Amino acid sequence: MGYRVAVVGATGAVGNEMLQILAEREFPVDEVVALASERSIGKKVSFGDDRTLDVLDLERFDFRGFDIALFSPGAKVSAVHAPRAAAAGCVVIDNTSHFRMDPDVPLVVPEVNREALRYFHKKNIIANPNCSTIQMVVALNPIHRVARIKRVVVATYQSVSGAGKEAMDELFEHTKAIYMNERKEPVNFPKSIAFNLIPQIDVFMEDGSTKEEWKMVVETKKILDPKIQVTATCVRVPVFVGHSEAVNVELESPLSAEEARELLDEAPGVVVVDRREAGGYMTPTEAAGEYAVFVSRIREDPTVPHGLNLWVVADNLRKGAALNAVQIAECLVEDGLL
C-alpha cells in the first residue's frame, strides 16, 4: 500500500533533505507533492536521483486525501497551515518549534520515545524536536535507561545549515571575502561567522539564556525525563553541515566508561567511534550525509559522583531534522497508526 505525502517547505534545506530521504529509504508513496510559498511556484525540486517535482502553492493547496504532511516552512507558516492540514485528515509531522511544547502534541525521537506516537490523534500533529536536542537524547537514552541521569551540562558547536540556506551562503561569501581582503557585514548572524565562533543561537531570554539553549532544556525533559536537570551553551561555528556537542552527565548510579561504550554500541541509531588515538573520533565533516548519531571521547568524569563525558556528532539536516521526520512517518506505518 502506498501513501500520499506532502512536503511543505520543499525548497528549503530541510525540505530538500526530506524529499531525498523519502526516496533513499523507499518510503511507500503513491504520490509526493512539493509545497512552498507563492514566490516558489514554477520552481522544480529533486525527488531522488531521477525525478523532479513542480513546486505548488501551499496557500491554495487542499490537503484532503493526503495521508502525511512533512512540514519545515518556518514556525509562523506551520502555525497557520499545519492545523489546516490536520483538520483535513492529514497527519502532520512538523519540524518547526511551534508545536513542540504543546501538551497535546507528542514530541518524538523514534529511538527514544516511539510510544508517544499513540497520542498524536488529539491534534493530528507530531512535533520533530530541535536538531541539537535530537542527537543528544539519542546518545543519552541508553545510558539513562540503565543508570538514570541526574544532570546534563552540554556545550554545542552548531553548523550554519541550522540557520538555513542563506546562512550557508553567508559563510561561503564571507570566507571568500576574507581571502579577497574585502569586508562584508553580517546579515544572518549577529557577528561575522567566517573563521569565528558566535555564542548566540536564536534570541536572548530574560535569564540570559538564548532560546536555543532553552529548547534543549525543555525538550530533553519532555522527551527523556522531566526530572533531568539540563544546562546548555549553544555556539554557532563556521561549519556548513553537522552539529557537535560536548556532553557531561552526572548519573544516579555508577557506570564505567566501558559499560557506557557497550550500551551505546548496542543502541539503535548510534555508532560509536572511540579509539584513544589521534583521529580516533568523529567530526562534523565526517558525519555530514550520514544517518547515525556518532559518539566519541567516552570517558569518566572524576570531578562528580558517577560522571561521564561524551562527544556527540550528527548531520543536523538529516538525523537532526529530515531523517527523524521520515522515521516518524515510518513508525506510523509500521505500528498501524495511519
Image: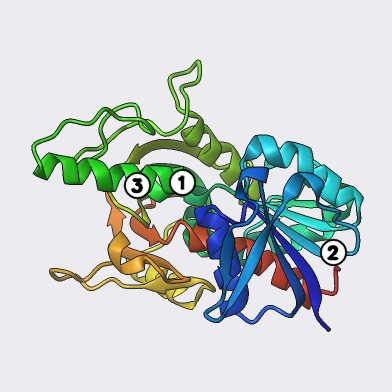
Distance from Cα at disc 1 to Cα at disc 2? 27 Å
The C terminus - image quarter: bottom right
Residue nearest the viewer, comparing 34 with 110: 34
Residue 66 is labelled as 2
Residue nearest the viewer, comparing 212 with 146: 212
Residue 19 visible? The answer is yes
Distance from Cα at disc 3 to Cα at disc 2? 34 Å
Of callouts 3 and 1, the N-terminal one: 1
Write down the quadrant of residue 312 in the picture.
bottom left
Q: Above or below — where is 235 with respect to 310?
A: above
Residue 242 in percent (x, y) is at: 37, 57
Residue nearest the viewer, comparing 46 with 213: 46
Residue 193 in percent (x, y) is at: 26, 38
Relative horizontal placement of residue 38, taking residue 191 as reference (left or right): right
Say which element carries label 2.
loop
Residue 55 in percent (x, y) is at: 66, 58
> Which label sits in the foreground, 3 or 2?
3
Query: Which residue is at 71% across, 42% downward?
Result: 78
The residue type indicated by label 1 comes to Gly
Residue 46 is labelled as none
Of callouts 3 and 2, the N-terminal one: 2
From the image, tell me which residue sits under label 3: 169
Query: Which residue is at 48% across, 18% downward?
Result: 207
Residue 164 is labelled as 1
Residue 42 in percent (x, y) is at: 63, 56
The residue type indicated by label 3 comes to Asp
The residue type indicated by label 2 comes to Phe
Query: Which residue is at 22% across, 31% downward?
Result: 184
Query: Which residue is at 85% across, 58% downward?
Result: 90
